[in-house]
Amino acid sequence: MRSINLSSFSIGFLMCGLVTIIQSWIHFERFVMSLDGLRLESSKFAKGLEKNESFQKTRNNSQGNLLLDVVSSSRNLSSFRTFLSRSDSFKQHFANILEGCSDICNTTIVGKNGIFFQQLTKNVNCSALWQNAAIDQSRPIGPAPEVPPEFKNFFDYNGRVRMRRWSGGLLNQQYSGGKAKSPVWKQDQIDMWADECGKGTLNGNYGLSATRSVYEGLLKMNSLQGGHVLVLGSEIPWIEACILRAGARHVTTIEYGVIVSEHPRVSTMTPHDARNAYLSEKLPVFDAIVSFSSLEHSGLGRYGDQLNPWGDLQAVARAWCLCKKGGQMLMGVPEAKQDGIEWNAHRVYGPVMFPHLTANWVQVWRGAPDFQRPYVFQKDAV
């Protein structure tokens, strides 16, 4: 009897030990976390992180979003271990671009069904986003950037977004910090294009059909009429011309490169200029926002900007901060049923990325199916 009892006790003890080991390993690998406290349930690894000065600085600067994305999304530690081994300048850059991003950079948030795709609501710290100079920095002059391995999970939403090299190879058009592709915008050119846009004969940058579809969307924006419109990204002023024709009073364009506008109703500024204007309270509240074929490039380094997995999300969130309540936004980005990144040309938005790009904007209208069909959104109170 004693022999049997001893064996039973030993087996039970071993089973309990095995279960404990398995549970500890699962906690170690997955770091089960709560969104409000970002609580680490792996005490062994947590103590190691608490002693790491670089991690602590990044964690504090990013308000926990680094930990949220790496651990809650990645399901493994390889990216984070690689991150910790990188140079201090790289880790500082990572911490800086996350400063004040809060929910905007949290790509694990889910929402509810919208008219066209999922509708997300996120908390936005407008002041912190606009104070962050790292978002607007240019990268050093040099070759087109590859994807750092430890950034891949952030760019591809932890494998939910297909990522591959663009068929045309890496692109390196370093406008950021220098002159734009078209550095001078002539008044007579803009006025002529405005007339052509109204007649439906303007090709714009993307052909006759795309320009007509954009103009149709602009005419549906009540907040544009007689208003001040902000444009995010524009190489040549075809869309500014259409906005004026659609009834706007004035257009201000933010573009990577420096542009001189000779049109009295069109102003231009770089992201750096826009941030300084915001901080000095000289940047107005806009009646409407327009962006077509621009946001998909943000943070990919193609135009001389710093690599930033959340560059597109931060740009739209900043625009949301500048738009009046009830104001509208027209947006056109590459769209497909499956999300993708054609490195480093552009992102292609689908059911994974599109909801995060348009967080806090209410879906109103969309144009006919096209690779970059325009959508109209409206800003409501959040």
Image: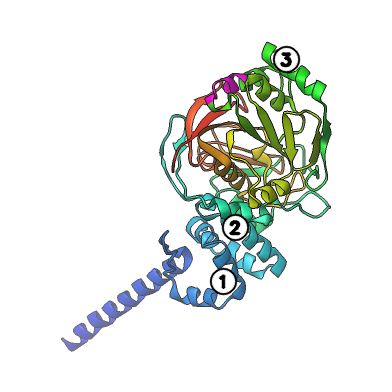
Number of numbered discs on residues: 3
- 292 displayed left or right of 16: right
Position of the N terminus, as image quadrant, is: bottom left
Mark 1–mark 2 Cα distance, whole angstroms, equals: 14 Å
What amino acid is labelled 3 in the image? Asp
Which mark is first along the chain, 3 or 2?
2
Q: Which residue is mark 2?
A: 98
Q: Nearer the viewer, residue 149 or 179?
A: 179
- 103 displayed left or right of 371: left
Queried whether the magenta region covers residue 236, the answer comes back as no
Colour approach in the figure: rainbow
Queried whether the magenta region covers residue 218, the answer comes back as yes
What amino acid is labelled 1 in the image? Gln
Question: Which residues fall within the magenta stretch?
Answer: 215-222
Question: Which quadrant would residue 382 be assigned to in this image?
Answer: top left
Under circle 2, the secondary element is helix
Which mark is first along the chain, 2 or 1?
1
Q: Which residue is mark 3?
A: 195
Q: Which residue is mark 1?
A: 56
What amino acid is labelled 2 in the image? Leu
Residue at the top extreme?
199
Mark 3–mark 1 Cα distance, whole angstroms, equals: 57 Å
Instruction: Give the label on residue 211, or none.
Output: none
The answer to whether marks 2 and 3 mark residues whose Cβ atoms lie closer than 8 Å is no
Which mark is first along the chain, 1 or 3?
1
The answer to whether marks 1 and 2 mark residues whose Cβ atoms lie closer than 8 Å is no
- Tell me where residue 317 appears, x and y as whole percent: 56, 45
State the residue at coordinates (43%, 33%): 114
Under circle 3, the secondary element is helix
* Residue 158 in the image: above or below residue 62: above
